[in-house]
Amino acid sequence: MTTYEDVTLVLVNAGYLSDADVEAAVAILKDALIVDAAEEAEAAAVLDELDQMETIEVAAELADVDDSAGDYESEEADFEIMDEASEEIEDDEEVIAVAEVVIDAAYTDAAAALLAAELIDEANAEAVAAAIADAYSAE
């Protein structure tokens, strides 16, 4: 797992942050770089999406078996299961999209906090946000 110290070292190595400001930057990132909840929500949604895809696959196979056997009532139930799983996938995709927006905003907010503390130059703020994103998401 990437630590706040790792992120600051990336910023130092890229020339955005001085060695003397590492400790202050770590403290700022601890307060400003809050992505854990969004990352957990995103991961849970991805796992659920995979489960729902598997559910659809199994239900489709059962629907084929039920159709072959002439059990149209069971086949209809299989289709309902597939529809419900598809709706769950859509919900998961919304959670993933929102989580990604929150995570991206956290990187920008972290760079803004470093800028507000005058630890980075304004001209580098966007590049710092991108570097934070790259470093923090390189887990």
Image: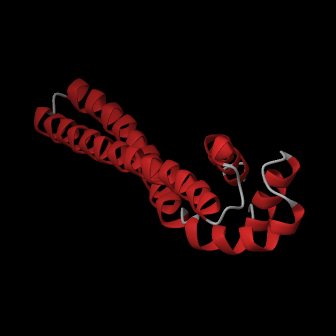
Q: What percent of the width, then of the height, locates residue 104?
A: 51, 48
In this picture, residue 118 sits left or right of residue 97:
right
Q: Quadrant of residue 114?
A: bottom right
Residue lying farthest left? 73
Q: Quadrant of residue 49?
A: top left
Q: What percent of the width, then of the height, locates residue 102?
A: 44, 54
In this picture, residue 2 sits left or right of residue 78:
right
Q: What percent of the width, then of the height, locates residue 116?
A: 59, 62
Q: What percent of the width, then of the height, locates residue 30?
A: 64, 72
Q: Quadrant of residue 89?
A: top left
In this picture, residue 91 sits left or right of residue 74:
right
State the residue at coordinates (56%, 67%). Answer: 32
In-front residue for pair 129/1: 129
Q: Quadrant of the N terminus?
A: bottom right
State the residue at coordinates (84%, 54%). Answer: 12
Q: How many marks?
A: 0
In the image, residue 20 sits, relative to residue 96, either above or below, namely below
State the residue at coordinates (48%, 66%). Answer: 37
- Colouring of the image: secondary structure
In-front residue for pair 97/77: 97
In-front residue for pair 68/119: 119
State the residue at coordinates (65%, 67%). Answer: 29
